[in-house]
């Protein structure tokens, strides 16, 4: 089962999780990160690294964020061809809607 990046990452993008991913399945746009469900091996390495607690195993995604399951699949597929792949830590994005717990 893949993991899913949810609403807590929206406008509050940290990349700590990307560095520990053994299969490099993270993608990004200007607002947040996404996990490619086809590549995720369910290792859970990313979960404790997320300072905003945005990553869940697909069966554990809270009800209000169920739409993020399909969003991760769609966005990661679209970003594969456009250079949105991320494997290294970058400066965090803390936009106006960020409620970072870090």
Image (cartoon, rainbow, N blue to C red):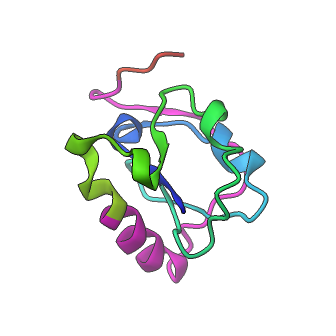
Residue in the picture at 37% in, 48% down: 31
- Can you tell which quarter of the image residue 47 is in? top right
- Can you tell which quarter of the image residue 97 is in? top left
Nearest the eye: 25 or 66 = 66
Residue in the picture at 53% in, 78% down: 80
Nearest the eye: 93 or 25 = 25
Q: Residue furthest front?
A: 59
Residue 21, given in percent of the width and then of the height, sits at: 73, 53
Position of 6 compared to 18: left or right? Answer: left
Residue 26, given in percent of the width and then of the height, sits at: 59, 60
Task: Tell me: residue 11, above or below residue 68.
Answer: above
Nearest the eye: 1 or 100 = 1
* Residue 72 is a magenta residue: yes
Position of 72 compared to 49: left or right? Answer: left
Task: Tell me: residue 40, above or below residue 47.
Answer: below
Position of 47 compared to 89: left or right? Answer: left
Question: What span is colored magenta in the figure?
Answer: 70-98
Q: Residue furthest bottom?
A: 81
Q: Quadrant of the N terminus?
A: bottom right
Task: Tell me: residue 79, above or below residue 8.
Answer: below
Q: Residue furthest top?
A: 102
Residue 22, given in percent of the width and then of the height, sits at: 79, 58
Residue 84, given in percent of the width and then of the height, sits at: 54, 67
Residue in the picture at 55% in, 33% down: 92
Task: Tell me: residue 37, above or below residue 44.
Answer: below
Q: Quadrant of the C terminus?
A: top right
From where the camera sits, is residue 72 visible? Answer: yes
From where the camera sits, is residue 32 visible? Answer: no
């Amino acid at each position: 089962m893949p993991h899913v990046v949810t609403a807590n990452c929206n406008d509050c993008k940290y990349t700590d999780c990307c560095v520990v991913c053994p299969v490099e399945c993270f993608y990004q746009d200007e607002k947040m990160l996404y996990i490619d469900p086809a590549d995720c091996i369910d290792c859970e390495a990313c979960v404790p690294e997320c300072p905003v607690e945005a990553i869940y195993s697909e069966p554990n995604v809270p009800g209000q964020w169920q739409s993020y399951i399909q969003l991760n699949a769609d966005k990661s597929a679209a970003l594969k061809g456009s250079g949105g792949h991320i494997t290294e830590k970058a400066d965090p994005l803390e936009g106006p809607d960020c409620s970072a717990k870090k």
